[in-house]
Every structure is written in structure tokens, then in C-alpha cells.
């Protein structure tokens, strides 16, 4: 008696043979190859407000006609997932300071989003004065700009993303429910004026369609089958699938350490070194080297924990950790 599975036909559950089942799988596989493209998310650093410099009088003079507070409307671009503002202060009305928030974030930010940017990694010029900065919605911004309401404190603001009596700093904001905000500035000093420079930058996430060749798509499939076989401890099958993957796409990073681990299990240290060396070279050329090094290190540590002191495994682990930090 033949082996039967269940298939859907015109919304009815019917029996189908194993041969029919694999015919359906092949058709699906061909359709995926024909499509030959993947949707990937990519993050970009976008300038929201170029550096602005302005002078705020002391609050005593502000009551006599000088300006001791001001505000700026902030409109975030579509698909903003987080944003930053940096600021610094100085004495004198003609001060002009370069903050460089855009250039710093462009250099530091991981476009895949896998590695976060710590705000303390962003350098802000040291301030010489002080100011209050309030993040608020547009309605409360209108209240802030009315002198009487401001004096009476008839406005609310987001305490997590505001700063009082600060000389300088960078503020990271993950509140993006609205794209319309206001940054309000006030000089807390009664007598001393201060110049303020600030800049605003957003991180925008976009779906990018990455077209792949037929061979690249096939390689991904074989690499996935190789990984699944490895997890099931079917090492010969894993080796066969993974080798097929790199024959179709020699630049497929993840296949090389996969092959290397099988060779370590088979006690073929030289072949393991060759494949890990190629993998390391490709990791360094990739868009996100840290991710690939971390994955390879994690897999090799798990292999050592499972099988013990495989010949050369600890040496390769040390090389991965060193190369991954260079």
C-alpha cells in the first residue's frame, strides 16, 4: 500500500500520494526561485534639523523685552523608529559650535539595527552655560510660548526626554507615536545670557527589495538544509548540503563555519581551518561583521560544550574572538 498524505483541493481535504506531495513542493521551490528577491529592512540616518544656534538672555532681561526662551517644531520623517537631539551651550552671542551629530551617527549606526548605539559614544562639545530643554507636543508648545502660561507653569512636557540645568548632552528618544513634536528652550539663569546650539537626527527604517540570482536563492536553500541536518546530527548530509550551497554561491558567509564544524567532528582539522579562514574573510567583507562573528562563536562554543576538546576547536574559537574584535 502506498504512503498517503493529506492535501487541500478546492478547499477540501483529500488524500494525496507522496509523489504528488513532492511535486507540489518542487513547484513551490521553482516559484520561489523565479521570484528571486527578498524584502530586507534597512535603517538610515536622516537629518531632521540642521545645527541651530541662538542666544537666550537671562530671565530678568527677558521680562524687559529680551528673549530668554524659544521653541522649534520638530517633524519626524515617515517610518522613524527612534531619534536623537544633541545640544551644547556657550557664553557670548556670536558663538558657533559644530556638534556633528549626523556624521557621528552615520559612522556609528548599524544599518541592520542589530547593534544599538550608546548615547555616551556620541561626543558633544563641552558646554559653558546652562539651559532647560523640554520635549512636548505642539499644543503645550503654544502654552510655553505664551509668557504668562510659561511663568505659571501651565504646560506639560515629557520628563524622560527633557533636561533642566544642563550644559550639554545627547538625548535618545524612542517615542515615535507622533511625528510632530516641539523642543522648547529656556535660560534658567536670571542674569547670565547663553548661546545654545542643537541638532536633531532620526533613524528611519525602510523595506528594501534585494534581488537575488537563481544560484544565490538555491544556495540559501541548501545552506538551510545543511543547518537543519547538522541540528539533527546528520553530519554527512549536512556536509553535502553545505558544500552544494558554496558551490552555488562562494560568498555565502554562514555556510563556511557550518562546514568547518562538521570537519572538526570528523577530526579533519586542516579542512576545518580552511573553511573557517574563508568564513572569517567573508565576515569582514559583509555589511555586519559583528553579527556573523557572534553567530560563529556561539555555534563553536556550543559544539565544544557538546563534544568536549575537539582537536583545534579551542584554537579556532580564539581566532574568531580575536578577529571579531579587530
Image (tube, rainbow, N blue to C red):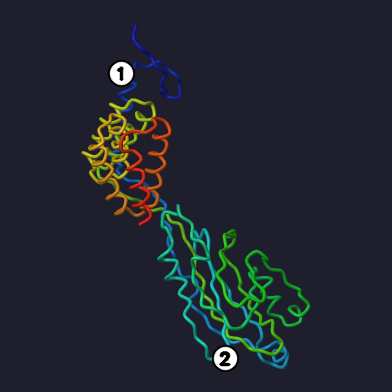
Q: Is residue 261 left or right of residue 95?
A: left
The outermost residue toward the top is: 1
| In this view, 106 is above or below 229 | below
Q: Position of residue 312 (x, y in %)?
A: 31, 38
Tell me the quarter of the picture where residue 222 sits. Answer: top left
Work out whether residue 319 or residue 202 is closer to the camera in this orientation and state it: 319
| In this view, 287 is above or below 75 | above
Residue 231 shows in this picture: yes
Residue at 42%, 52% in the rendered image: 41
Tell me the quarter of the picture where residue 59 sits. Answer: bottom right
Work out whether residue 109 or residue 178 is closer to the camera in this orientation and state it: 109
Find residue 92 and name its label: 2
Mark 1: few/some/many CA within 10 Å (<14, 14-19, 20+): few
Find residue 19 and name its label: 1
Q: Is residue 92 left or right of residue 224?
A: right
Q: Position of residue 195 (x, y in %)?
A: 58, 85
Q: Is residue 308 left or right of residue 216?
A: right
Q: CA distance from mark 2 to mark 1?
A: 83 Å
Tell me the quarter of the picture where residue 191 sits. Answer: bottom right
Residue at 72%, 69% in the rendered image: 156
The outermost residue toward the right is: 152
Query: How many marks are shown on the rendered structure?
Result: 2
Q: Nearer the viewer, mark 2 or mark 1?
A: 2
Q: Position of residue 316 (x, y in %)?
A: 32, 43
Q: Position of residue 27 (x, y in %)?
A: 30, 30
Mark 2: few/some/many CA within 10 Å (<14, 14-19, 20+): some
Amino acid at each position: 500500500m502506498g504512503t498517503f498524505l493529506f492535501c487541500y483541493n478546492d478547499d477540501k481535504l483529500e488524500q494525496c500520494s507522496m509523489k504528488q506531495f513532492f511535486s507540489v513542493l518542487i513547484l513551490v521551490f521553482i516559484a520561489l526561485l523565479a521570484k528571486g528577491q527578498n524584502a530586507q529592512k534597512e535603517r538610515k540616518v536622516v537629518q531632521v534639523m540642521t545645527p541651530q544656534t541662538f542666544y537666550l538672555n537671562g530671565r530678568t532681561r527677558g521680562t524687559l523685552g529680551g528673549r530668554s526662551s524659544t521653541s522649534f517644531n520638530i517633524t519626524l520623517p515617515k517610518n522613524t523608529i527612534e531619534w536623537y537631539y544633541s545640544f551644547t551651550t556657550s557664553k557670548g552671542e556670536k558663538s558657533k559650535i559644530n556638534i556633528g551629530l549626523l556624521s557621528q551617527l552615520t559612522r556609528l549606526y548599524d544599518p541592520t539595527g542589530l547593534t544599538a548605539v550608546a548615547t555616551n559614544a556620541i561626543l558633544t562639545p563641552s558646554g559653558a552655560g546652562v539651559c532647560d530643554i523640554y520635549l512636548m507636543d505642539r499644543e503645550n508648545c503654544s502654552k510655553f510660548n505664551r509668557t504668562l502660561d510659561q511663568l505659571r507653569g501651565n504646560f506639560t512636557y515629557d520628563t524622560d526626554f527633557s533636561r533642566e540645568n544642563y550644559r550639554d548632552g545627547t538625548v535618545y528618544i524612542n517615542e515615535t507615536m507622533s511625528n510632530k513634536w516641539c523642543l522648547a528652550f529656556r535660560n534658567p539663569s536670571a542674569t547670565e545670557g547663553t548661546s545654545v546650539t542643537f541638532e536633531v537626527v532620526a533613524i528611519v527604517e525602510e523595506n528594501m527589495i534585494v534581488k537575488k540570482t537563481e544560484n544565490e536563492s538555491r544556495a540559501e536553500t541548501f545552506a538551510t538544509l545543511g543547518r537543519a541536518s547538522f541540528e539533527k546530527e546528520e553530519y554527512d548530509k549536512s556536509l553535502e548540503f553545505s558544500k552544494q550551497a558554496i558551490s552555488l554561491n562562494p560568498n555565502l558567509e554562514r555556510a563556511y563555519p557550518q562546514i568547518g564544524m562538521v570537519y572538526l567532528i570528523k577530526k579533519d582539522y586542516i579542512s576545518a581551518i580552511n573553511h573557517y579562514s574563508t568564513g572569517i574573510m567573508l565576515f569582514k567583507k559583509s555589511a555586519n561583521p559583528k553579527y556573523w562573528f557572534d553567530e560563529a562563536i556561539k555555534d563553536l562554543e556550543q559544539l565544544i560544550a557538546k563534544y568536549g576538546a575537539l582537536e583545534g576547536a579551542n584554537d579556532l574559537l580564539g581566532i574568531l574572538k580575536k578577529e571579531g574584535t579587530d
